[in-house]
Amino acid sequence: MSETDTADTGTPSRFGRLLFAGGLAILAIRNLTDLEGRIAYADAKGVPSADRLVPAASGLLLGGSLGIGTWKFPKLSAGSVAAFLAGVTPVMHDFWAVDSESRDEELTSFLQNLTLLGAAIVFFRRASEN
């Protein structure tokens, strides 16, 4: 029997969705409640129009996380989270371009975001199958 013969294509685990979505929602809310600090950090990383992009990206993350958690518009929601992570990760966590003191922290953040991106892609694929 192949893997696809036994694949469950229903709604993903509520508990798993809530863990994933809850963590992302908290990250988005932290960004939105400290906009000045997040914008300053993005400016320091060379993000153009950080004053507009940081709130927009954080809103994208928040909306996507809520949609995954409730499984409402799941394809759009997972796509929003994936777009956020794909855009933000290489710019904000460029471990290859920082000094040796910051390299480990940036590498850890980069790998964490890469892992979250993988999960968002899995949710997107599951939503596409439904």
Image (cartoon, rainbow, N blue to C red):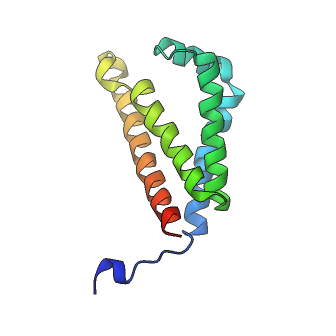
Q: Is residue 62 left or right of residue 93?
A: right
Can you give x and y, in whole percent of width and height, for residue 54 in the image? Answer: 60, 25
| Viewer-nearest residue: 105 or 40 | 40
Residue depicted at x 56% and y 44%: 80
Residue 107 percent location from the top left of the image: 35, 32
User: Of 6 and 16, which appears nearest the observer?
Assistant: 6
Q: Quadrant of the N terminus?
A: bottom left
Q: Where is 51 relative to 13, above or below?
A: above
* Residue at image coords 46%, 16%: 45
Quarter of the image with the C terminus is: bottom right
Q: Is residue 25 above or below residue 57?
A: below
Count all numbered tags in the image, as a single digit.
Answer: 0
Please, which residue is most extreme toward the right here?
Answer: 33
39 vs 23, nearest the viewer? 39
Query: Which residue is most to the bottom?
Result: 1
Q: Is residue 1 above or below residue 103?
A: below
Q: Residue at x 59, y 24 (%)?
A: 53
87 with respect to 11 (left or right): left
Instruction: Determine whether 114 is above or below 33 in the image.
Output: below
Residue 10, located in which quarter of the rendered image? bottom right
Quarter of the view holding residue 81: top right
Residue 90 position, x and y percent, is 39, 29
Residue 52's x, y, as percent?
64, 20
